[in-house]
């Protein structure tokens, strides 16, 4: 679990230019939050970001896949 915590901390560090973010343990992984709003999830060593209709195609073009439970 230390490795998962390190990855979550690394993600938060990378997101610092966007403003203060935090990783909270949840669902066996981590939720990524900015100003109380969850916009990302770390599950099984992968980072998933919330997408809308416009950004979904951009993520898919970069090879990203949607999170499935």
Image (spheres, grey):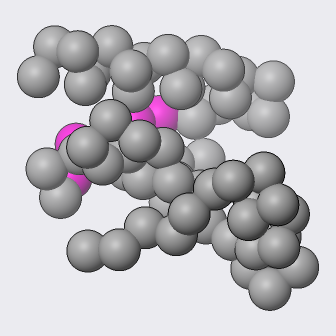
Q: Is residue 47 above or below residue 41?
A: above
Q: Position of residue 42 (x, y in %)?
A: 38, 45
- In the rendered image, residue 25 lying in the magenta stretch gets the answer yes
In the rendered structure, the answer to whether residue 59 lies left or right of residue 45 reads right
In the rendered structure, the answer to whether residue 69 lies left or right of residue 59 reads left
| SS majority, magenta | strand
Corner quadrant of residue 50: bottom right
Q: Position of residue 19 (x, y in %)?
A: 74, 32
- Residue most extreme to the bottom: 53
Whether residue 56 can be seen here: yes
- Residue drawn where x is 60% and y is 47% of the image: 34
- Residue drawn where x is 41% and y is 41% of the image: 46
Quadrant where the image shows the N terminus: top left
In the rendered structure, the answer to whether residue 51 lies left or right of residue 18 reads left
- Residue drawn where x is 76% and y is 74% of the image: 56
Q: Position of residue 66 (x, y in %)?
A: 52, 69
- In the rendered image, residue 11 lying in the magenta stretch gets the answer no
Closer-to-camera residue (19/39) = 39
- Residue drawn where x is 39% and y is 21% of the image: 7
Span of residues in magenta: 22-26
Q: Position of residue 69 (x, y in %)?
A: 26, 74
Q: Is residue 35 above or below residue 10?
A: below
Tell me how many marks there are: 0
Whether residue 35 can be seen here: no
Q: Is residue 6 above or below residue 30?
A: above
In the rendered structure, the answer to whether residue 68 lies left or right of residue 4 reads right
């Amino acid at each position: 679990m230390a490795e998962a915590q390190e990855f979550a901390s690394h993600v938060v560090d990378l997101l610092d230019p966007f403003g203060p973010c935090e990783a909270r343990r949840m669902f066996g992984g981590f939720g990524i939050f900015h100003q109380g709003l969850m916009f990302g999830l770390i599950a099984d060593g992968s980072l998933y970001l919330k997408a809308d209709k416009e950004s979904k195609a951009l993520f898919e073009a970069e090879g990203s896949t949607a999170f499935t439970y």
